[in-house]
Amino acid sequence: MNDWEPAIGLEVHVQLATHSKIFSGTSTAFGAAPNTQANAVDLGLPGVLPVLNEAAVRMAVTFGLAIGAEVNRRSVFDRKNYFYPDLPKGYQISQFEHPIVGPGHLRITMEDGSARDIGITRAHLEEDAGKSVHDAIPGMTGVDLNRTGTPLLEVVSDPDLRTAEEAGAYFRTLHALVKALRICDGDLSQGSMRCDANVSVRKTGDEKLGERTEIKNINSFRFVELAVRHEIGRQIDILEAGGAIERETRQFDADEGVTRPMRTKEYSEDYRYFPDPDLLPVEVTDELIDSIRASMPELPEVRAGRYRDELALSAYDAGRLAADPDVADYFDAVYAVCGEAKLSANWILGELAASLNRDTLSIEDSPVPASQLGLLISRVADDTLSNSAASTVFATLWSAGEGDVDEIIAAQGLRQMNDSSALEQVVAEVLTNHPEQAAQFRDGKEKILGFLVGQVMKATQGKANPRQVNELLREALK
Amino acid sequence: MDKLNITHLAKLSQLALSDSERAHVEQDLAHIIDMVDHMASVDTNSVEPLAHPLDAVQRLRPDEVTEEVNRNRFQRGAPATEAGLYLVPRVIE
Amino acid sequence: MIFPGIRDIAAALDRGDYSVRELTEQCLSDARTANERLNCLITIADERALAQADAIDRARARGDTGTLAGVPLVHKDIYCTEGLPTTCASRMLANFTAPYSATVVERLDAAGMVTFAKANLDEFAMGSSNENSHFGAVANPWDTDRVPGGSSGGSAASVAAGLTPVATGTDTGGSIRQPASFCGISGIKPTYGRVSRYGMIAFASSLDQGGVLARDVEDLALVLGAMAGYDERDSTSSSHDDAWLEGVSHTGVGMPDRSLTIGLPLEYFEHHTGSVALVDAAKATLEAAGARFVDVSLPNTAAAIPAYYIIAGAEASTNLSRYDGVRFGYRCENTDSIEELYERSRSEAFGAEVKRRILTGTYALSVGYYDAYYLKAQKIRRLIQNDFLRAFESVDLLLTPTTPGVAFRRGELTGDPVAMYQQDVYTTPASLAGLPAMSLPCGMHERLPVGMQLIGPHFAERALLQAGALYQRETDWHSLTPDIGEHPSADSPVQKEES
């Protein structure tokens, strides 16, 4: 294995979060009935013409600035010609020779904390195709053109990635970036980001890349890793057996965990790109760049760095919070209330995440607002609440979808017993009632302390501070 | 100029040519190509290609949903539809 | 002259000589009769026309109308008309009705013009003789054995035969000017971008431009003024304002406000045909009216035809990919595979010339040929535009023949596409450069009309039209009409219905 070096490049199609399509005023909303979001332009009817959506251009420029790329002041839309039922005009409007975003880079951080800059060759605007439906009508293919004309930013990386893990990290980092920039909703299950992976291997030390294969349409972080890992292994096996890699398009079979060749087209691909005469060159002015730069949100990498350096969060927690701008915004709001970074991270990535997940809610729709979670964490930090009582308060807030932390504490009598004289009395009672266990502890059976703590907690209906109970018990048993 | 590959061109254009048609087309295209080959005599060194007669830039449309789609109206003239889908012979992917 | 000018029609309507409905009924009935001989119309739109006519009569009664209200109109059947078939003279669209109207159609509707028919054309506007129509060839009213020119042949024949005072056309490489010349009428192709292409079925997007055919320059201007102007639905539509053109219905075209300098490009006068002699005569007329003439050179003219056929073919080859039998239009029967559906639908529904252009264009764009053909043609396009820009540094307009010869016989050039393409030798350069150009009748040669072409700088429609008005003040060629037998006399365009 050491003899071979993989070179992986990803082409990621990012659906831009515009309201209307890239060349028409039709809605881009997902999930409408077939062909109810395809107007004359989207359907490619005779005589109609494309007009470019400003937001798509802004989003592309935003991305370009975020990856430190040269934004091309003049870019050109071309026609990519081929026939397919989900491509109504018989050509896709794309950018070939003059893309809107030139070379830039994306920094990926691996789990061990090592970081690498991955080159981005280019990013260009294009229109999405429709969908072919194969199972609706027996023996026929149905064509739904709702997705036609949804703006895409195709982000092409250099073949800089060396492992399947790096490929996965790149896709995740790109996902976090486009979400943070608010140019994509990042919903992989709805195809908002789709990835093609170009994979080749070469002898370590060779300058020239080996022949590559392209794995099409991978739509999850995990599948990118699995598909690339399998493809690297497959290519190495062939090469070690003295074979040669055939340039081809493959697809990933998630059930079997393997890549397979796709049905090849009968004729060689000749897309006959040329400038679309229905569209003029796109000009990006200084004013546009300045206005986008001025309203640029904090990038995930910067945000994670801030969480690590200023709030002393672990790299792992910082990365997870910063990966989703909505989560990070929520975290910022919680932290602003309680001032407890670590506790806030634990609650958000733990109990809140689990609850959101269970009820399939996004964080913007959380029944517990950041202000209340912040207050709850304050009450834990100041020993008003035990952890178990805090969980009770959280569950109450969650199911009610409203309410105030302090009112719930008062109404349910959840305030922790911090009065040591009252607690000392309970401890004394517990020891009196359980002389055997007390004796066992004194004989060195440390584990029995847990039982005694439990009895105190029970007697105080969970309001005692377990740490304090622990201390008092040890003192009393000396 | 290489020999015209009419079969390839027809395939790219999704046109089926009968044998007699093919012979005609081949001859016509050969004449047309002879005609356009006169372009080679024009010196175009360091000339910028002109894709568009007016020196203008693309106008941008505000990102607003302006279209209400009435599917029935668009599908009235469609050769084959069912359940709102345009139907074609089964495509194997 | 069967129809008086638009202003005369408006005056007659104002006087109550006849109603818009009566005028429209007359047009419909004349059209039906004449179409049997000329085949210049694909659709005669009784219902739409009469509904429009009645609406205009009511609006006229309220005094709520402009000059064009009630004036009959024929649209080239390449403009989408909601509620009426739009065929592009192709089997592909023989049963197509667009669920929208072209901007040009909307604007002329709004001006109150009454569309009573849609004119025949070469299939998808590809042709110079109107012989390439799924609905059959169009006859030239001056000699029905001859072609009317193309691709706006049906529009030109309709105007020449007196069926309508005005018709819309489109011009990609001469498709308004050449048929205007062959039919002895006036026709203008405006500056590229002046008229919206929205809803005008595309042939070659960077060249296509909508325009007008009519008897004289005044009528061209009136209709152009109503249909031109920026359209946000067409990215290539120009926002260049032209207050003069917008106001021309009030001011009239008028005469040039100064003495014109007109260039004669040497390259357009190299072949001494009968037509050239008549253009020389026109030069003398304009000189006598105060214009000054100078010789200029447009050295890349000879390369225009090849460059034009590459660029137009390339754009057409992909513009026509949407005709695939899936969402609208013709679909072949009994197909098992998508490839077969595409190939057979397209092959059965496209005519020979359309297929030739698609294949030529595909060739010019395909791997290995792009640089030698498509890119080379674009560079030549730049050189041709530069030739014109240089010439317009010293002249206001250019005067040339419109075509190398007069209308040819039907079938005369069939089977020789290259010879047919040479018809466009004088018209394609202005198309490539995006310049406004106009053909005006300037005489008769062997009993057939001859046209001359005036070409202006970008957006110089005013200078172009005023020069044309000057010429037509001095001459009568635009008033000559073919003898088409049993038509109503010139004096009474409409016979009042007796009731």
Image: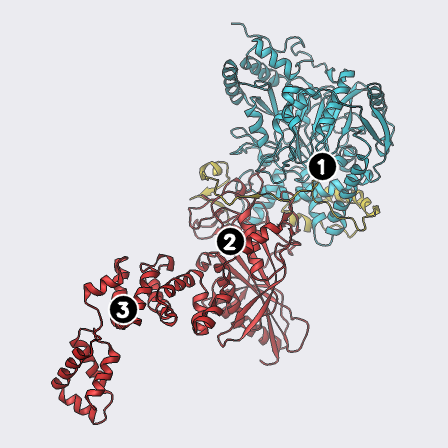
Chain colours: A red, B yellow, C cyan
Q: Which residue is mark 2?
A: A16
In the rendering, at what x and y percent does residue C77 appear? 61, 29
CA gap between label 3 and label 2 equals 39 Å
- Count residues near mark 2 (Cα–Cα under 10 Å), then give few for <14, some for 14-19, many for 20+: many
Q: To which chain does the residue with label 1 belong?
A: C
Q: Which residue is depicted at the point 24% across and 70% down?
A: A389
Q: Which mark is residue C434?
A: 1
Looking at the image, can residue A448 be seen?
no
Screen quadrant of the C terminus of chain A:
bottom left
Residue A29's label in the rendered image is none
Disc 2 is placed on an element classified as loop
Is disc 3 in the same subunit as disc 2?
yes
Numbered mark located on residue A391 in the image: 3
Labels 1 and 3 within one chain: no
Q: Quadrant of residue A100?
A: bottom right
Q: B90 and A101: which one is in front?
A: A101
Q: Nearer the viewer, mark 3 or mark 2?
A: 3
